[in-house]
Image (spheres, rainbow, N blue to C red):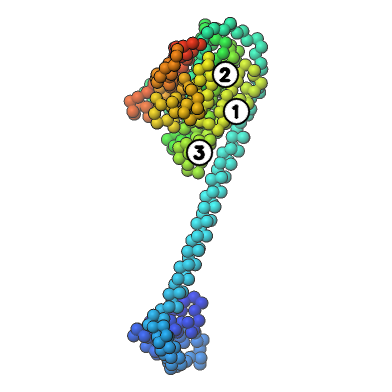
Amino acid sequence: MVNDFKPHSGETERQYSWRICDYVKKGELTWQELADLVNKYYRASEEEYRTESAYRKPLQAVMAYAEEVFGDNCADDYYEKLLKLKDDISSERYKLQALKLESTRDNRINSRFELFYENIAKVVQKLEPPDKFNDCCYVTGSEFAWVLGIGDIHYGAKFSSINNSYSPEICERRFQALFAALVNKIQAEGIQTLVIVNVGDTLQGILRMSDLQLNDKPVVESLVEVSRLLANFLNELTKYCYVEYYHVPTANHTQTRNLGSKASELAAEDMEYIISHYIADMLANNDSVTVYFNEGKEFVDFNIFGFNCFATHGHQLKNTKDVIKDMGNVNRKLYSYAFLGHTHSANEIIVGEEHHNNIEVLTVPSFIGSDPYADKLMVGAKAAAKLYKFDNLYGHIGSETIILN
């Protein structure tokens, strides 16, 4: 039976007969079979059929001429060109598909983040700016300054561990307890100005899938609620003293990690920025509080009795003991105290000394306390805030832990 050699798409009669004549040369077809194939695919009726010699004679003449001029490989040359053309067309088609996929992915990611910020705009209901508290009774000053360190609030998380339970409602109750303890301290010590440092991780966030499992409510809703909670907390404190509030600009749990970026690769894309600005907006008409944040940086710095201090979350640090030296080298500034979070446990490390005071790294306890992950590692610490006492000559001279659970 004659082999069924089908013509390629768009192949003319002469191109087809020239291609398959190579099989005659190889002994795989006879000239009669070649004529039958050409007639089959290129003749509409038997009246149009051509004889074997009508193909054999011209093709033999061309083959003889081609072999004399080009050698033995010319019979495959046209077929190879067709295959190469086919590969080129396939390659271009795949390139177009890749471009379309890339464009679709970018549009999908951009749409997600547009929706995220639109949801924030819908949920946010700005508080009425609090009234001024002209009737505040300030006690005469002293030679001491007081700094409250809070951090790792992880608002939105909900869990129960061996020694701790947490939820947005429990978080609110802890702020109420902290407020009562501070009022007692302010009145007992005659504190005129209280410096409050928030070292970050204000939200549980969306750092990884396990965080979504801990979240009690959507991140956008948690962002609004914790901003209002902190603003009300600061607002109520101004009834008893002046408040300077410092909020670190970045942390790890509040990073959005856009487009699959790695940890801290896009440090400026951080929800701490939204929280700190939201708090500042709500307290804009309260002259008894000032909100500080350091836009574009990963730290916020301040001064106590001439001692240079800074606060950062601490997730980016490799060696905690060297943070003051490293930060001083980068910013060309002599720092005496560093306030850090992230480790969920309080610590005070003396790393040097000056004329009258120690140089210290002060790690703030966590507001959230221990969790199931800490239980697995058999570590943990009580939920707490910490009040640091500074002397105008000797710097940091004492600390008081306010246990919250």
- State the separation of the CA atoms marked 2 and 3: 28 Å
User: Dot 1 surroundings within 10 Å: few (below 14), some, or many (20 or more)?
Assistant: many
Horizontal and vertical percent position of residue 184? 52, 9
Residue 356 position by quadrant: top left
Which residue: 61% across, 25% down? 280
- Disc 2: which residue: 244
Residue sitting at x 52%, y 60%: 96
Disc 2 is placed on an element classified as strand
Can you give x and y, in whole percent of width and height, for residue 72 in the image? 37, 82
Between 257 and 246, the one lying in front of the other is 246
Which residue lies at the image location 56% right of the left edge and 21% below the top edge? 245
Q: Position of residue 63 (x, y in %)?
A: 41, 87
Which part of the image, by quadrant, shows the N terminus?
Answer: bottom left
Left or right of residue 105: residue 353: left
Q: Is residue 33 or residue 250 the one in the foreground?
A: 250
Q: Is residue 165 visible?
A: no
Q: Nearer the viewer, residue 405 or 186?
A: 186
Label 2 crowding class (10 Å Cα cut-off): few <14, some 14-19, many 20+? some
Q: Earlier in the sequence, mark 2 or mark 1?
A: 2
Secondary structure under badge 1? helix
Q: If the image is split into quadrants, where does the C terminus sit?
A: top left
Q: Disc 1 to disc 3, how far (Cα)?
A: 21 Å
Q: Amino acid at mark 1?
A: Tyr
Residue 71 horizontal/vertical position (percent):
39, 83
Q: Is residue 76 above or below residue 108?
A: below
Asked if marks 2 and 1 touch (Cβ < 8 Å), the reply is: no
Q: Nearer the viewer, residue 223 or 271?
A: 271
The answer to whether 42 appears left or right of 127 in the picture is: left
Using the image, tell me which numbered label, if any, was put on residue 266: 3
Q: Which residue is mark 1?
A: 278
- Residue kind at label 2, given as amino acid type: Glu
